[in-house]
């Protein structure tokens, strides 16, 4: 048979003729894709954070009802006019109010912050004049878990020295890192001089407590002293009026009696202490337990967890050089570590998938050059997708990488179709160049239609709204781009390589070809027999198909359903709640019992415990609340999943009388704007507070009776004496 060489027309013919240009185009795709891959941030999931702001206000001494009526209500009325507001929740406690504002996903966080600041300014004339500071806001989702827990401890130095290092040297510097929203100091032990006045001594000497207070205030001032002007020099007077230690307060004169001064040291016990002596935090390992200051680093919504954590950890080496040798600085838990492990697993899965696909191609084609040609479509398509991901602002996360893994099976199909048709022409005796032109021309339209139709399957995911739409947007775009790039590669690079490097020797096949050919002939014979059997028993096969369909529908209804699967991040967050009105000494003893229980658990690597002070949520900042945060051993070092560890720890931690422990595995996405004691929450609303309080207690009682529910509780705290 004689074949006439045809130059061909169309895009494929152009790339077949211009081999150098085709090579340069593909190298450009690979180069820019590799550069984009290096710049893509790493995350666990796509950014689905709702733009969230928290407004805080303080009025010392005001009860919750006053905080709600005088502060929260005027602010909420102004906030309700802001564009894009999705939800607004306020929590009022003794002397403090916290308003959590969530905006729509398409709302800019910086723009929302400007609107909130303007609303606070408009509400200022309506707020009580006795507020020590105007309301302030932070760009933080209070329901989001910290990305880093840092523990600073010492067996020698007092806790207020640790607090000074943590607050002034570390927390302020970490807050300056881009993407850090807030640094919470747990177990705060800020230095203060404590003065305990003896009331009997005051009564005997006829001195009022107001005189003592006035004397302390007048003798501890920080005001400019003045300047001395001379004929040739000017000097600023340096005379500090601040008292910085307990010893400095003792000589302070309160008043004069019978012409003699009465000093503060005669009326009171004065000692160096801390502002909040009812706040404690411990950093615990299985073999030790020390008082500590714990710093919880929270990121801003929309920022990358791994990048922010890396920038914060880069400062730790500098901190360690500045801290005294007696101070230990350790990372209690790092959320970015689990994200990196998950990303490494996904990368390994992708490489394994690539290897398996290439192996299967080789087993069926049984030709080295025929295997290499379609295999080149895989890396070019995947690497080229990284360019689009970078331009779209995506990240390398579990969903986008899963899209690439799925795309590996799709992108090779087009190249194999082109290759097989070209090989068919070569088997008919056509030279490689002619076979490339004709083979590509015949299936060109088929390749385009296959590519477009396959990409169109994932387009509806782009039109999904809300959290799900944002979650699957990167998945849909990534897999669509990979499929489209593979279609382009299949009609350009693949036929060009076939025309120049494909060699087909069907007349003298190798030994491997002969051995495998017998195996494939056996498979074909088996398929032929099963096909004839199904055609003979058509009704039975049809009934079996309907049975499988019905069983699938039944199994779909029986399978548990959820938003996201439970991940094992080696972390357990525990909220501790004691009876309302408990003394801080009793709370201290209860926490110590829980610490001893936690130290004995073989799954725990380290943890911190504490109560009082800052806990990250107004709902759990009362004197009867505590917290435990467990950092478990790595998954391969323990036999139990984190959910099984929780079920094992729950009865142990709830064995202390008067204490309840609420354990939860932190979910990868927090949809709410408040940190609660459980993963699911009902919200009751009403205009009559007394009816609301009564209904809440009844509702909690009835919910506890439902089988399958555990840790049923309420954030209503109205029983404190």
Image: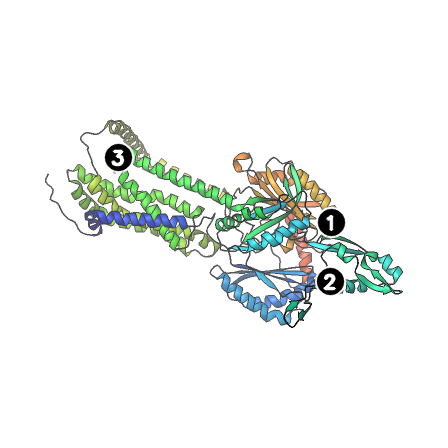
Question: How many numbered discs?
Answer: 3
Which residue is labeled 1 in the image? 584
Q: Nearer the viewer, residue 259 or 188?
A: 259
Marked residue nearer the N-terminal end (3 or 1): 3
Please identify the quarter of the rendering in which residue 596 is found: top right
Q: Is any atom of residue 478 visible in this view?
A: yes
Query: Residues at badges 3 and 1 in contact (C-beta under 8 Å)?
Result: no
Mark 2 or mark 1: name the one nearer the start of the chain: 2
Label 2 and label 3: CA atoms lie apart by 87 Å
Residue 176: image x %, image y %?
Answer: 54, 56
Q: Is residue 212 above or below residue 539?
A: below
Q: Which mark is residue 674?
A: none
Q: Is residue 143 left or right of residue 106?
A: right
**Residue at the image position 58 percent from the left and 52 percent from the top:** 170
Quadrant containing the N terminus is: top left
Q: Report the side of 92 relative to 452 (left or right).
A: right
Secondary element under disc 1, as helix, strand or loop, is: helix
Q: Residue 35 location, x and y as percent?
A: 37, 49
Residue at numbered disc 3: 368
Q: Position of residue 195 (x, y in %)?
A: 77, 56
Residue 219 on image: x %, y %: 75, 63
Write down the residue under mark 2. 220
């Amino acid at each position: 048979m004689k074949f006439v060489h045809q130059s061909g027309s169309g895009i494929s013919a152009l790339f077949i003729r211009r081999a150098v240009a085709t090579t340069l185009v593909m190298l450009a795709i690979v180069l820019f894709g590799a550069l984009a891959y290096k710049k893509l941030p790493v995350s666990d999931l796509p950014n689905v954070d709702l733009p969230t702001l928290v407004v805080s206000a303080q009025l010392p001494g005001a009860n919750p009802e006053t905080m709600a009526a005088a502060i929260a209500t005027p602010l909420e009325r102004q906030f309700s006019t802001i564009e894009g507001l999705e939800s607004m929740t306020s929590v009022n406690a003794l002397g403090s109010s916290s308003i959590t504002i969530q905006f729509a996903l398409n709302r800019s966080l910086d723009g929302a912050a400007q609107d909130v600041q303007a609303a606070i300014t408009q509400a200022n004339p309506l707020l009580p004049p006795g507020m020590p500071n105007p309301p302030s806001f932070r760009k933080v989702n209070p329901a989001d878990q910290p990305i880093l827990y840092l523990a600073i401890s010492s067996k020698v130095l007092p806790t207020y020295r640790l607090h000074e290092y943590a607050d002034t040297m570390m927390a302020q510097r970490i807050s300056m890192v881009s993407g850090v929203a807030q640094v919470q100091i747990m177990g705060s032990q800020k230095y203060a001089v404590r003065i305990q006045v003896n009331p009997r001594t005051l009564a005997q000497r006829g001195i009022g407590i107001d005189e003592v207070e006035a004397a302390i205030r007048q003798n501890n001032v920080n005001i400019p002293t003045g300047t001395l002007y001379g004929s040739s020099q000017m000097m600023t007077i340096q005379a500090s009026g601040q008292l910085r230690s307990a010893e400095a307060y003792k000589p302070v004169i309160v008043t004069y009696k019978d012409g003699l001064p009465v000093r503060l040291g005669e009326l009171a016990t004065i000692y160096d202490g801390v502002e909040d002596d009812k706040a404690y935090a411990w950093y615990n390992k299985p073999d030790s337990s020390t008082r500590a200051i714990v710093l919880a680093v929270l990121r801003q919504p929309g920022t990358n967890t791994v990048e922010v954590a890396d920038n914060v950890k880069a400062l730790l080496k500098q901190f360690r050089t500045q801290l005294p040798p007696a101070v230990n600085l350790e990372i209690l838990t790092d959320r970015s570590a689990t994200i990196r492990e998950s990303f490494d697993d996904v990368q390994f899965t992708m490489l394994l998938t690539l290897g398996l696909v290439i192996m299967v191609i080789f087993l069926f084609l049984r030709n080295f050059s025929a295997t290499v040609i379609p295999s080149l479509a895989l890396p070019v398509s995947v690497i080229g997708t990284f360019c689009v991901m970078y331009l779209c602002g995506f990240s390398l996360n579990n969903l986008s990488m899963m899209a690439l893994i799925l795309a590996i099976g799709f992108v090779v199909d087009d190249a194999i179709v082109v290759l097989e048709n070209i090989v068919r022409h070569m088997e008919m005796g056509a030279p490689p160049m002619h076979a490339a032109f004709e083979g590509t021309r015949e299936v060109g339209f088929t390749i385009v239609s296959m590519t477009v139709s396959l990409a169109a399957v994932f387009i509806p995911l782009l039109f999904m709204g809300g959290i799900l739409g944002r979650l699957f947007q990167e998945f849909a775009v990534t897999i669509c781009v990979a499929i489209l790039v593979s279609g382009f590669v299949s009609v350009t690079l693949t036929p060009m390589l076939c025309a120049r490097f494909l060699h087909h020797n069907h007349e003298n096949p190798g030994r491997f070809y002969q051995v495998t050919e017998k195996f494939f002939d056996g498979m074909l014979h088996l398929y032929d027999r099963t096909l004839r059997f199904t055609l003979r028993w058509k009704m039975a096969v049809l009934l079996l198909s309907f049975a499988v369909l019905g069983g699938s529908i039944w199994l779909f209804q029986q399978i548990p359903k959820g938003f996201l699967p439970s991940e094992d991040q080696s972390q357990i967050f525990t909220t501790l709640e004691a009876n309302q009105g408990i003394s801080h000494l009793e709370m201290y003893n209860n926490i110590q019992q829980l610490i001893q229980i936690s130290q004995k658990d073989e799954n725990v690597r380290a943890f911190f415990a504490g109560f009082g002070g800052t806990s990250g949520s107004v709902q759990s900042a009362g004197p009867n609340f505590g917290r435990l945060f467990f950092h478990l051993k790595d998954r391969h070092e323990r036999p139990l999943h984190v959910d099984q560890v929780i079920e094992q720890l729950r009865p142990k931690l709830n064995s202390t009388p008067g204490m309840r422990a609420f354990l939860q595995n932190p979910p990868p996405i927090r949809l709410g704007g408040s940190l609660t004691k459980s993963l699911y929450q009902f919200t009751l609303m009403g205009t009559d507070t007394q009816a609301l309080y009564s209904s809440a207690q009844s509702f909690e009682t009835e919910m506890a009776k439902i089988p399958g529910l555990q840790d049923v509780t309420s954030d209503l705290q109205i029983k404190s004496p």
